[in-house]
Image (cartoon, rainbow, N blue to C red):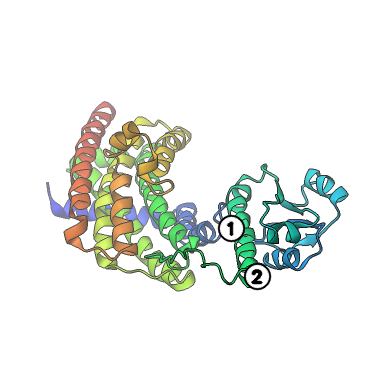
Amino acid sequence: MRPANILHLGIKELRSLLRDPIMLVLIVYAFTLAIYSGATAMPETLHNAPIAIVDEDHSQLSRRIVDAFYPPQFVPPVLIGRAEMDARMDAGIDTFAIDIPPDFQRDVLAGRSPAIQLNVDATRMSQAFAGSGHIQTIVNGEIASFLQRYRSNHAPPVDLALRARFNPELNKSWFGGVMKVIDNVTMLSIILTGAALLREREHGTVEHLLAMPVTPFEIMTGKVWAMALVVLAATACSLLFVVQGLLKVPVEGSILLFLAGTALHLFATTSLGIFLGTLARSMPQFGLLVMLILLPLQILSGGTTPRESMPGFVQAVMLAAPNTHFVMLAQAILYRGAGISVVWPQFVSLALIGAVLFAVSLARFRKTIGTMA
């Protein structure tokens, strides 16, 4: 092995990437617009949900309930008649429709338990799921506040003091921005290395490399470090200018420590990209393989759904995936300000997984090169 060969082969990969405008556009998009749109358009966020209210009571309490719904969670409520409620729901105009019955305030003051009807358009699943509980909380809060004026001699209910750590405003864009960076790091590293190998095979330049005094190890290592460097630089810029700058997401921990963990993750994922590139015979085949591998890695790694919510078997299997450990260390460092004393198990796991993937990919790469010689 000659380090000079690895250096020059990596520089060759960088020059080849600079001559590929489509790949350059993909890199820029993945770490700018994709991060911003993914963070600000979280589908589960309750935002500007349309709501209509049938007020059959026309009391002070019913007016308080109507006035409790306001932007940005809901659009200003539309007061409608009972006959309009079903027609508007069928037409998809309203996601929520509340029917406050007659004599509602009188029954509440009398200690009865009147029922408010809440109709939900469940075809809008993201808003329906989050909004139903939110509406119940708002209505119960207004009723409790109203009753305190008339029952001041009663002891007030227990107050729950909520303190949300690491994200006091419960802002989903803070979570979504960092998770999109993690997803795109994995996606770009696999695509760039696999595409670099396939591009050489399609252009016939692999045969030129075989005629040179270089080894398969040097060829593969040159591709790995070059593509990893590109993704690492794009990650640093995205974290500084998009996540911290544009989205205003506070980063609690060391960015350098996070980038060190990213480098280990890239060691594993670029090796995986080489392996997929040796399996595929063309770019379309490579694209299909990436879809089959990438989606489970991203969905089951803990970035979309907490690992604790998954079956035990899935949790155990996903410990062999680099994404799982990368998500753990990224959340610990960027959100909770963890140091190396906390995340060292994830660093060790990424190094071991990367070494195994590199060894397997190198064996496969040598076999592929051997068939072409």
Q: Is residue 322 left or right of residue 293?
A: left
In this view, the residue farthest toward the left is 1
What residue do we see at 32% from left, 37% from top?
315
Q: Position of residue 295 (x, y in %)?
A: 44, 40
In this view, the residue farthest toward the top is 371
Q: Is residue 187 left or right of residue 364?
A: right
Give, as a three-letter code, the residue at label 2: Tyr
What residue do we see at 31% from left, 45% from top?
324
- In the displayed structure, 159 sits above or below 184; it is below
Q: Nearer the viewer, residue 223 or 205?
A: 223
Q: Residues within 10 Å of mark 1 (few under 14, many from 20)?
A: few
Q: Nearer the viewer, residue 275 or 307?
A: 307
Q: Quadrant of residue 318?
A: top left
Image disc number at residue 150: 2
Q: Nearer the viewer, mark 2 or mark 1?
A: 2
- In the displayed structure, 363 sits above or below 358; it is above
**Residue that carries the numbered disc 1 in the rendered image:** 137
